[in-house]
Amino acid sequence: GEELALLEKALGLQSGNKYGAHGERQIPVLQTNNGPGLTGLVTIASYLVKQAKKEQLLGSSAEEKAVVHQWLEYRVTQVDRHSSREDTKTVLKDLNIHLEDKVYLAGNSFTLADILMYYGLHHVMVDLTVQEKETYLNVSRWFNHIQHYPGVRQHLTNVVFIKNRLYTNAH
Amino acid sequence: MGFGDLKSAAGLRVLNDFLADKSYIEGYVPSQADIAVFEAVGAPPPAELFHALRWYNHIKSYEKQKASLPGVKKALGKYGPADVEDTTGAATDSKDDDDIDLFGSDDEEESEEAKKLREERLAQYESKKSKKPAVVAKSSILLDVKPWDDETDMAKLEECVRSIQADGLVWGSSKLVPVGYGIKKLQIQCVVEDDKVGTDMLEERITAFEDYVQSMDVAAFNKI
């Protein structure tokens, strides 16, 4: 519900879509005018991207589209589960490795994967200590970049990353 | 500012370090700043400097649009970490700091005389800099920041303090010092330029974080 509203705004869509939530795990449902409701975060998000005529956010080449989809799936299966602190650390470690040589999740272009991963990880990043942010340096760099992307952050808290690194030198 | 000689291993290491927590040379979008540095680097950095390589490959993907990227190309010495000296003295693709570049030319070839004069000036500048410019008065201040109680999140408190940014203010190291009853105060160092930042301003901004900070005191104050 709330995340999808944020996404709509980020995509420049007028809100008008009606959302519900289904089942114990509160899976989002979108009531469309002509047809059955759409279920699932990734499904609805992809639909909204197309509604906003911003299909490039789903990836350009076949490979890029697959990578975008891979991270959307990761978001729902790995990030959203009621995770223990250990699981969260694993996610951050995975992302940190993946982002070592990439500016965005899909490589060189900003995509829906970046947007949904940002929303999905916001509550995690907000609570990281200064030292943890430095440990997951690539994630911090990526997160700081995405939160400055026009229209994405909206009313969410700006997570502070300090400029002068204190703990590093081991990269 | 500046990265040093970007065709040397040392310069690339400075660039690599600079880019560890940044996607771009300046700001959050690709700009002429990135193009200027990209052109100076010339070739992909080695694989072990993976931040620089990540940035290089990313900027390369903008090659076709480079003319339309925002911003204006500046001299290389204007980009990069603030605390690195611009050491592009002897190389032919060097750009000097404005104050000491008497001849202001972008030519790669310089007359012997001009080169000698510039190197002399650079040496003077460097020795002056290593003594910390006498012109700017600085102080090193040690602050004690006290929380409300022993349940205050000290990591958050530290973050709030460090988030205070100002021209002429640089945060240094910090530690937590127990003061009794399980309460710890944050002792944090900072260096300020006297005419830009004062302890009143620091106190005002630190105590503004009312949720975490009960009070702030100056534990030590030394002129540098």
Image: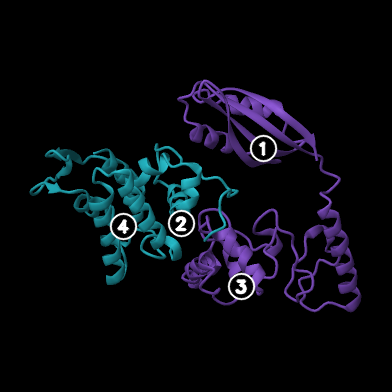
Chain colours: A cyan, B purple
Tell me the distance, in whole angstroms, between the alpha carbons under discs 2 and 4.
27 Å
- Mark 3 and mark 4, same subunit? no
Above or below residue A91? Residue A15 is above
Give residue B38's position: percent from left, percent from top: 58, 70
Judged left or right of residue B45, residue B89 is right
Determine the secondary structure under disc 3. helix
**What residue sits right under mark 3 in the picture?**
B41
The quadrant holding residue B115 is bottom right
Q: Residue at x 50, y 67 (%)?
A: B50
Above or below residue B169? Residue B70 is below
Q: Amino acid at mark 4?
A: Lys
Tag in front: 3 or 1: 1
Q: Earlier in the sequence, mark 2 or mark 4?
A: 4
Q: Amino acid at mark 2?
A: Asn
Tell me the distance, in whole angstroms, between the alpha carbons under discs 3 and 1.
36 Å
Q: Amino acid at mark 3?
A: Val
Q: Determine whether label 1 and label 4 are within 8 Å by CB.
A: no
Mark 3 — on which chain does it sit?
B
Q: Determine whether label 2 and label 1 are within 8 Å by CB.
A: no
Judged left or right of residue A75, residue B23 is right
Determine the secondary structure under disc 1. strand
Give residue B154's position: percent from left, percent from top: 50, 32
Mark 4 — on which chain does it sit?
A
Q: Determine whether label 2 and label 4 are within 8 Å by CB.
A: no
Q: Residue at x 52, y 55 (%)?
A: B21
Give me the disc on residue A54.
4
The quadrant holding residue B71 is bottom right
Asked if residue B25 can be seen in this view, the reply is: no
Tell me the distance, in whole angstroms, between the alpha carbons under discs 3 and 4.
34 Å
Q: Determine whether label 2 and label 3 are within 8 Å by CB.
A: no
Determine the secondary structure under disc 4. loop
Mark 1 — on which chain does it sit?
B
